[in-house]
């Protein structure tokens, strides 16, 4: 594959990036070709030494989305980063998706539990309005206790969600380094 074919395939694999970012990356690879040509290497040798443009594109996209998720913390950025890392290979489907589903399930379960406990007084009031004869002081105090526990759970879930998100981002960065061959 010659330089033009390599750069065209790389450009196609980076289509999710902005035009400016793509141009910068392509200019870097163009410069790499130019420098290697000065060492009397053919375009085919240079392209072969760089690797597959599609894999390079996947790695660059994963790195881009990870950086974006770290700087602008949002659910969309986080999910795009996870998806980009999973796209690096089949190995990552198992290694990244499994822990991701488990952690998201635990976080969602914690938020649902805390939320259910917090809204328990409203459910108690609805029950008393619909069936006034069912009022018991035990139920009233039990729902107040559940509300207090629910508030503690919700506060804990705020911290747990932040810690798990940051920890998983570190895990994704580690995974990208392993896939790129950065771990010696």
Image (cartoon, grey):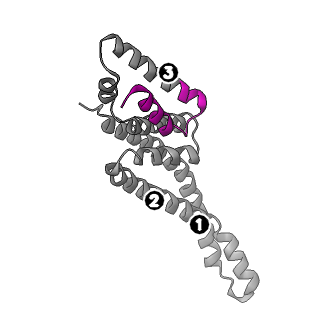
Report the number of numbered marks.
Answer: 3
**Mark found first going from the N terminus, 3 or 2:** 3
Residue that numbered label 3 is attached to: 27
**Mark found first going from the N terminus, 2 or 1:** 2
Residue that numbered label 2 is attached to: 106
Q: Disc 3 on helix, strand or loop?
A: helix
Q: Quadrant of residue 62?
A: top left
What's the CA distance linking mark 1 and mark 3?
56 Å
Q: Nearer the viewer, mark 3 or mark 2?
A: 3
Residue that numbered label 1 is attached to: 117
**Mark found first going from the N terminus, 1 or 3:** 3
What's the CA distance linking mark 3 and mark 2?
44 Å
As displayed, is residue 120 above or below residue 170?
below
What's the CA distance linking mark 2 and mark 1?
17 Å
- Image: magenta residue range: 1-23
Using a 10 Å C-alpha cutoff, classify the residue at mark 1 as few (fewer than 14 neighbours), some (14 to 19) or many (20 or more). many
Q: Disc 1 on helix, strand or loop?
A: helix
């Amino acid at each position: 594959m010659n330089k033009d074919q390599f750069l065209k395939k790389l450009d196609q694999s980076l289509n999710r990036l902005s035009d400016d970012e793509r141009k910068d990356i392509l200019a870097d690879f163009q410069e790499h070709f130019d420098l290697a040509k000065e060492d009397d290497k053919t375009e085919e040798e240079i392209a072969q030494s760089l690797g597959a443009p599609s894999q390079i594109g996947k790695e660059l996209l994963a790195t881009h989305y990870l950086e974006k998720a770290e700087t602008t913390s949002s659910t969309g950025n986080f999910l795009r980063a996870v998806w980009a890392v999973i796209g690096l290979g089949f190995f990552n489907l198992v290694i990244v998706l499994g822990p991701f589903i488990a952690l998201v399930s635990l976080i969602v379960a914690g938020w649902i539990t805390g939320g259910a406990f917090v809204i328990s007084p409203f459910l108690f009031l609805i029950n008393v309005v619909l069936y006034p004869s069912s009022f018991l002081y035990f139920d009233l105090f039990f729902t107040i206790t559940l509300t207090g526990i629910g508030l503690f759970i919700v506060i804990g879930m705020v911290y747990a969600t932040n810690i798990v998100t940051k920890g998983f981002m570190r895990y994704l960065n580690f995974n990208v380094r392993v896939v790129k061959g950065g771990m010696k």
